[in-house]
Image (cartoon, helix red, strand yellow):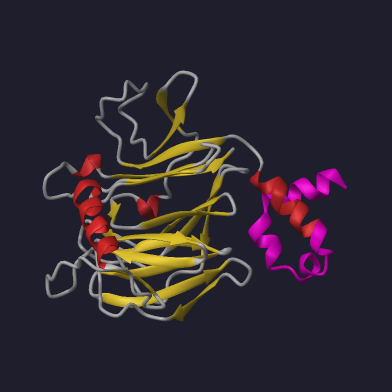
Amino acid sequence: IKACLKFMSCYYHPMLRRPEFRMLPAPLRDQVRDMRMKGTATLVAIGDFTDTCLDLANQDEPWSMLRYNELEQRWKPLANNLPQDMINVRGYGSAVLDNYLFIVGGYRMTSLEISVAHCYNPCKNEWNHVAPLNQKRSNFKLLAVSGKLYAVGGHCLSTVECYSPGQDWWTCVASLPDPLAEFSACECQGMIYVMGGYTSRGVFYLEMGSFTHTQTGILLYLLMFLVLLWLIHLCVCFSKEKKILVFSYLICETFFPVSLIFKLDVFSF
């Protein structure tokens, strides 16, 4: 039984799509998910790290995934790289859901937007395709909320798509009030909050709100404005136990080499 539970935890999302798994008692399904989430939280960087100054061996190889070794306090190449069709893709969204790393959308160096979606399973150290987005989008936010993924906005887009791992498809949900790109977004108590960004007309937003258009006080607006000026696209979030770190940092291509653009996420090995 233990081997069977371990197998189901390694392939948790595919199991969600099987009617046999859905017929299992709820406590047993919860046990499988709990096994999935066990392990050591590891910080992983995704990007183009060729010719960096990270003191890596075999720097002639095009490393695209690094993991941080806390004991040695240095970055090391992960025993896997991005899928070939994601090389030289920028402006994608990434998020961790159920200890899977998702990389979705973006644009190629030819400025061609894509809708492809990939999923990395650290339990098996392998990449798999999942259902693509309904709309091609880049410079958007991908958020994990209540067991689902949400692709929010993007260049000239106000639409929002929701991915269900149990069905492996995307559905459209409530849209943003205006098309928005290069904004910050976060999840709090099951709600998505969008901050900053600019519209397709080049108007910079200083407004914060949720999809339910919750009104906030003027003091909170001023506070968020000051925070946005300081953080720009930096978002650091620690759990109370300081065990889980989610760190997102986007460097503008206008001022920095493309090789410095990367995204950091955390999942367990």
Residue 257 in view in this figure? yes
Q: Residue furthest right?
A: 1
Q: Position of residue 82 (x, y in %)?
A: 42, 46
Residue at point 40%, 75% (across, down): 211
Residue 183 in view in this figure? no
Residue at point 47%, 57% (across, down): 118
Residue at point 88%, 47% (across, down): 1
Q: Tell me the quarter of the picture where residue 164 sits.
A: bottom right
Q: Relative to 233, is 93 on the left or the right? A: right
Does 115 appear in magenta?
A: no
Q: Where is 213 relative to 37, above or below?
A: below
Magenta range is: 1-27
Q: Relative to 170, is 157 on the left or the right? A: left
Q: Position of residue 5 (x, y in %)?
A: 79, 49
Q: Position of residue 150 (x, y in %)?
A: 45, 67
Q: Where is 214 relative to 206, above or below?
A: below
Question: Looking at this view, is 10 or 71 the one in front?
Answer: 71
Residue at point 67%, 56% (across, down): 12
Q: Relative to 29, is 71 on the left or the right? A: left
Q: Position of residue 32 (x, y in %)?
A: 75, 52
Predominant SS along the magenta part:
helix
Q: Tell me the quarter of the picture where residue 49 sits.
A: top left
Q: Where is 41 relative to 9, above or below?
A: above
Q: Looking at the rendering, in which quadrant would you find the C terminus?
A: top right
Does 2 appear in magenta?
A: yes
Q: Residue furthest top?
A: 72
Number of numbered callouts drawn: 0
Question: Looking at this view, is 62 or 4 the one in front?
Answer: 4
